Image (tube, rainbow, N blue to C red):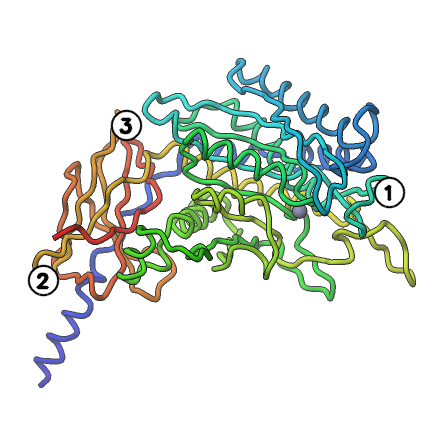
Amino acid sequence: MRAFIFFLTLTVLAPLLALPAPDPKPQPQISAVVKEISAKNIEASIQKLVGFGTRHTLSETKSETRGIGAARRWLQAEFNRYRADSGGRLQVAMDEFLQPPDERNPELVQVVNVVATLPGEQPEARDRIYVVSGHYDSRVSDPLNAEADAPGANDDASGVAAVLEMARVMSQKKWDATIVFMAVAGEEQGLFGSTHWARMAKEKKWNIAGMITNDIIGSPHAEGGNFASTRVRLFAEGIPPLREMSEAWLQQIKTGGENDGPTRQLARFIKTQGERYVPGMTVDIIYRKDRYLRGGDHSPFLEAGYPAVRMTEPNEDYRHQHQDVRKEDGVQFGDLPEFVDFEYVAQVARINAASLGALALAPAAPGGVEMETKELTNDTTLHWQANHEPDLAGYEVVWRETTAPLWQRSLAAGKETRFTVPKVSKDNYLFGVVAIDADGNRSPAVYPVPAAK
Ligand SMILES: [Zn+2]
């Protein structure tokens, strides 16, 4: 009996003995980016954006000092300033279009996204695009009020300031894949800017391998005194809420992979890399597309089929969100800069930059990952398609218990595109395959679909 228990213990523990490969030393380039992100610059950008009075999508566009037109011209000039420091590599564009009238825009309105693209340096990786966004439009209590002061310091000058600072710092360095830094408009009227851009990307069949929107990342303080300056929420959708389920999702759900879609893999990657490069910060993944029944600029990207997540502060303060600037019974309402913690915004920007940098240095996540099912066996065999980056070093098979949120174990698979994990059953664990380059940069994991028998 004792021998049997000993045997049982060994059998159960065996899968846990293959510890994950030690994290390679931090990439100096990512550490430098994290260090160079400045709370002072972020504060200056937020104050400048608030200084335009209102950035309502239907506001004044001719003035040089007030309204959304002045705000976007300033954003364009900022990106162009970074372009000069990037040796001309950062490409700045105004993505303009006319949004037809709707509930929240009584008249045809010109909407402009300000977009800065840093092309990847590696030809094999250049078509792989990562997008980071914030929205520069703002609003008060009445969503149609384009006249009143709408400072939008937290919602969402904080996100835009973080995107600007990332563009400034990251465009001075070289990355394998392409990074798009985007300040969108029309968010408060119905996600106009992000919808336009995501649909265009889908039409052009662009490979958006990951998208992060930063919206309301300005303060760790909430009404009622909740305070969590070392945490940020990362909203990540599981299965998309569609009436018609795609074949890919069907295959995934059939095998218990409902928590392993591309967006959840992106969230795991951001949590792991963000916390690795920004010690002291915790990324709280929330298994939900957004806050309860609310939406943001990642939604149109998800609808277009791209992995996309939302970063938001840990506790929102609704006295300072979508409110007319006013005092009631001595309480100040309104989204004013005095309620933004610039150092906190910088920490969230650092998490973003570390994750984007790690994504843009790493090889693409492997394609065609499949689980072999021909024979009933307690070993687990996976195969996948070869990557084509010249700096590819090989692959790694990762796995975790089915109830665990993050990868727990791994084995190096070398340069082969087929690998067997002995004595670890696919019945009991969730698996993934990761690509690794010569510097130790790892891609997000890909969940295997069952191979045809
Ligand atoms: Zn917002």
Percent from the top left, x then y, of residue 396?
Answer: 23, 45
Kindly identify the amino acid type of the residue bearing the numbered disc 1.
Ala
Determine the secondary structure under disc 1.
Answer: loop
Nearer the N terminus, badge 3 or badge 1? 1
Q: For this rendering, which residue is in front, 104 or 2? A: 104
Residue labelled with disc 1: 148
The 10 Å Cα crowd at callout 1, few under 14, some 14 to 19, many 20 or more, is some
Residue labelled with disc 2: 377
Where is 170 relative to 87, above or below?
below
Name the mark on residue 72. none
Label 3 vs label 2: CA separation? 34 Å
Percent from the top left, x then y, of residue 10?
Answer: 14, 70
Where is 35 relative to 73, above or below?
below
Whether the residue carrying mark 1 lies under 8 Å from ligand 1 is answered with: no
Percent from the top left, x then y, of residue 5?
Answer: 13, 80
Percent from the top left, x then y, of residue 163?
Answer: 60, 35
Could you tell me which residue is drawn at 59 percent across and 60 percent down?
293
